[in-house]
Amino acid sequence: MINPASRLGKWLHWLFEASLILKGLFAAAESLGGLGLLLTPNTAIITFVTWLTRHDLTQQPTADMALWVQHLTEAFPLQVQHFYAFYLLAHGAVKFTMVIMLARRILWAYPGAMVLLAGFVVYQITEFVTHGSYTFLALSFLDAIMIVLVYREWNVLKLLRGAAH
């Protein structure tokens, strides 16, 4: 294991803490997005998207992005909206809880976080294979790096707590 007091050890610890901050911010944004979806009427979303894309479509009736966004809202019934709202709320809340527990250095949270992140990686790889979304592939790569950082921090924490006793 890399010495925690070495330059590389300190840099890896900083990288771990920076990734926790980013994960926490994304988790909070995800939860707020889910809450926004849950509290916003479906018709208001469709009206807003129509208003947003109307100018582009009057200027260029074949604007691909505007047509794609309008098509998405046409297939956005209330049940789908509620699914995404609850999914984002739950996913964000779970990740935010994980970040808080890791930031507080709760020892049992480290293996739990690795299992949770591995689950995200499996899901995201499945989505990449199924739908070809490179976003999911990139997220999987970042989560795999996070697993390595969490594992390292867990070992350092166990070492430091063992030395303190």
Image (spheres, rainbow, N blue to C red):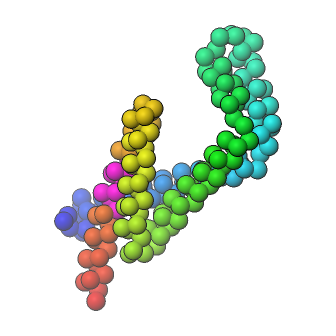
Residue 40 spot, x, y in % from top left:
77, 45
144 in magenta: yes
Q: Which residue sits at x=41%, y=54%? A: 119
Q: Which residue sits at x=72%, y=23%? A: 53
Residue 89 seen in render = yes
| Above or below 58: residue 117 | below
Apparent side of residue 124 relative to residue 50 in the rendered image (left or right):
left
Magenta segment main secondary structure: helix
Which quadrant is the N terminus positioned in? bottom left
Residue 14 seen in render = no
Which quadrant is the C terminus positioned in? bottom left
Q: Which residue sits at x=35%, y=44%? A: 141
Looking at the rendering, which quadrant does residue 147 occupy?
bottom left
The residue closer to the viewer here, 92 or 29, is: 92
The residue closer to the viewer here, 78 or 162, is: 78
Looking at the rendering, which quadrant does residue 90 occupy?
bottom right
Residue 45 spot, x, y in % from top left:
75, 36
| Above or below 37: residue 66 | above
Residue 146 spot, x, y in % from top left:
36, 55
Q: Which residue sits at x=42%, y=70%? A: 109
Looking at the rendering, which quadrant does residue 63 occupy?
top right
Q: Which residues are magenta?
A: 142-150
The residue closer to the viewer here, 74 or 13, is: 74
Of all residues, the one furthest to the bottom in this rendering is 165
